[in-house]
Amino acid sequence: MARGLGAGLVGMVMALFAVSLLVGPAGLPPLQALTALVRGDALAETLVMREIRLPRAMLAVLVGAALGLAGAAMQGYLRNPLAEPGLIGVSGSAALGAVLALQTGLAAVHILALPFAALAGAVLAVLLILALAGPRGGSITLILAGIAVSALAGALTSLVLNLSPNPFAASEIVFWMMGSLADRSMTHVILAAPFIVAGALVLLALGRSFDALTLGEDAAASMGVSLVRVRVMLVLGVASMVGAATAVAGAIGFVGLVVPHILRPLVGARPSALLPASALGGAVLVLMADIAVRVILPTRDLKLGVLTALVGAPLFLHLIYKTRAQGL
Amino acid sequence: MLQATAHLTGRFTLALRRASRVIGAALALWAGAAAAGPPERVVSINLCTDQLAMMLAGPGQLVSISRISHDPNMSVMLEQALSYPINHGQAEEVFRLNPDLVLAGQFTSPYTVALLRQLGVNVVTLPVVNTLDAIPDAILQVGLLLGQQDNANALVSEFRAGLAQLRTQRDTRPRAALHYANNYTTGANSLAHDILNAAGFANIAAEEGISGGGHLALERLVMLMPDLVISGQPYPGASRAEEVLTHPAMTALRDQHAAQALSDADWVCGTPAVLRAIAQLSQLHEGG
Amino acid sequence: MTALHLQNFSVFRGPCDVLRNINLQVGAGECVGLLGPNGAGKTTLLRGALGLMASKGQSSIAALPLAARAQHVAWLPQAREIAWPVKVETLVALGRLPHLGVGQKPGPLDQAAIDSAIARMRLQGLRGRIATQLSGGEQARVLIARALAQATPVLMVDEPAAGLDPAYQIALMQTLTAEARAGRTVIASMHDLGLAARFCTRLVVLSQGEVVADGPPAQVLTPDVLARVFHIRAYVDHGIHGPIIQPLDVME
């Protein structure tokens, strides 16, 4: 990754993180807000900053980085710019895993049951997609497989939530399908962070292999890339990141599509350079979306996926048109 | 659940418009029914009309009550409710019970009500009671509909006496917040608001200008530093909506500043059961 | 030193055998042309020898560990895949991946190998262009440059001349023979008998999964082999220009 781009993205993440800490219905003046965050003297202000806004901003960074990096990695492996965790049903399946853990009460038994269930859902989806789309990840099979997996996961999620004895559960189908960071807490940060960090380390280590895969599987294999190892690490890395992100924030679509697409020309299209850039870019996008939902509708919980889809869906159409023109 | 349902379905305006149209028609039907003698097969398809009907009906007069009255979280008269068969408020099953009077709520599905009326069933929709002062009217109205005016009058005097006893002047007015799933709260013009006031508490949501039901962001709620947080009680099964009730910020607020209480079934309906809610809150007031 | 040694080497696909009992030894300095009609098993032989397909018997290259293999042999598959719009020099630099440790940046030695490969494929003018926007022939040359940049003792290429104009076909074959003369080994599958006869030091002819002829071009490209294996008649001449072969017509 070019040093200038890296520094620019890090700067944007930091600036947006600060803005995210300062935006909210409590109407705290910035100085007072930051004092309360650092010093923790006034009870109300401190609770707002430390227990409500700080975890929210941290989760935006974590979830965004997870989705951006997972998207770039899936694309690097399948050599297809349409491979995105949300579109191909990985997020939806992770949501199904999370919902099952919550509604069966498993999540209440052990704290790690929720992220692991989401991870398991994501693993199944990635395996299914890889099996259906084949090694080259042709666009048509990839998208068709994605539609099928998404639809199935979405339907089962709705079914589980509708069967819940809890009267609110059914109305939360929207949350699981569109995602939100409203009123998340430090508990969620602690729950998701280890999985996201571990997944990031696994995926970033695959950069060289993805570079080699630019020349196709055969050439990559002859250049010392173990395709089996790459595949296993990809599945685990993507599932770990997307699973944890979805378990705490619901399924936020299009981040993994939009971010790599915008950044690819800026890193000279090298898949290895695109990985860290997309992690930072994902954090930027989700921070921006999460600030926007609070500015547009401060008191209501507008879903993040609404905004990311508004940006992402037209781009998706554009990409489909482009790949069709290329006859893929 | 009444609030929750109303909030979830969000059909306020439609329902209100229909309600005003429907009340006139209901009054006409009710006059006719009264002339023909008290109804013999009454079916209630709304939690709150269930409760009033159970309090007032004569033996055998009430044939079925709504499913929700068997829910221990929602029902103030569970033991009594368990002795009645339940219905799910669907036109087909209600019609088959062959009722001569159906009691529904203002927010009962307008399609169900219209369909039952089309089938010639006498359906009366009762308005939602959102002040303490409207409770006697509601009791009297159901009493009249059931032909149980004596029971109704007795219940009303009992209620008035109980309320007068609880409504005592206090020196302080601590600020209370009602905090339900999804950060839902109720401000002025709500039964819960009246319950708070009667027990000597100010309602923080009303301070914020919320009238009826509304959302109060978690941040705002914390910033307002209520002295008492009255939370909705959790339902079985998990929901993200209810996670705000145990959010670390709320836990810390309760640990370090505010007293806490649960809002239970007694808060839901405009029936004499609200007296229990007021009494419990008053104790908190005196204790704190 | 032996560059490639195949012993009783067979490749199966499902119940059918695609290659049967191949025995082949290729040494340093040889430029081997692998000939055969469509479906004879040329690509299978190369991929199997590289360990990219399950096989039976011995292959000296497939026996190497993955990392050592990548430093011993460079492989240019027939499918010319360039998945992302990277610059030409970035693509050629990928050839250095097997020589770099994790996180290691290309050093002066690597840069020299990249520059030399670019120069040999006459790509200096295209260095900064986006590889995916080049013509098919240009892309082919870029991909060959990538394999050259890998700077391995053995170079295995699958139909490298396909899609190139005559001048670049000849230039490519000259580059490959130069590699061989420099002591490296080149094994190239080919369809152009003329190019093969003229530039290769040795030809191996495959037919229906077996080696049917192996030796210097003049010995291999006999009317009998051409008729039996390729079903063609050709004009063959051994004059001052070296061996010349021009297919004439198809035999019924």
Image (tube, coloured by chain):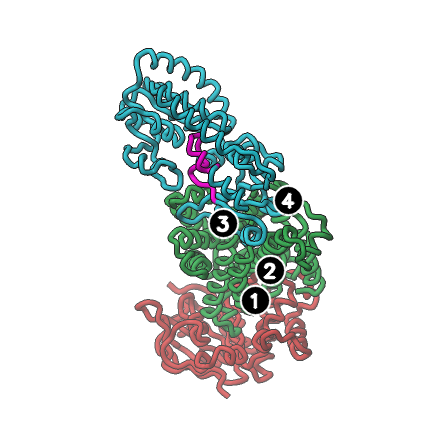
* Residue on which disc 2 sits: A279
Task: Determine whether C2 is above or below B45 in the image.
Answer: below
Q: Nearest the camera: A85 or A318? A: A85
Q: Which amino acid does label 1 sit on?
A: Leu
What element does badge 1 sit on? Answer: helix
In depth, the one of C96 and B225 nearer the eye is B225
- Is B85 on the left-hand or right-hand side of C156? left
Image quadrant occupied by the N terminus of chain A: bottom right
User: Which shade of the palette goes to chain B?
Assistant: cyan
- The amino acid pointed to by label 2 is Ala
> What's the CA distance linking mark 3 and mark 4?
19 Å
- Residue topped by disc 4: A25
Say which amino acid is labelled 3. Glu
Chain C pictured colour: red
- Location of residue C18 in the rendering, given as x and y in whole percent from the top left corner: 36, 70
Task: Assign a secondary structure to mark 3.
Answer: helix
Q: Magenta segment: does it hold B275? A: yes
**Rendered view: C140 above or below B126:** below
Badge 1 and badge 2 both on one subunit: yes
Q: Give the image location of residue A313, x and y in percent.
A: 56, 45
Discs 4 and 1 share one subunit: yes
**How far apart in space, not on screen, are marks 2 and 4 (Cα)?**
29 Å
For label 1, the residue is: A204
Chain coloured green: which letter?
A
Q: Between residue C244 and residue C83, name the one nearer to us.
A: C83
User: Which stretch appears magenta?
Assistant: B262-278
Q: In the rendered image, which quarter is residue C47 located in? A: bottom left
Mark 4 Cα shell of 10 Å, populated few (<14), some (14-19), many (≥20) = some
Front of the two marks 4 and 1: 4
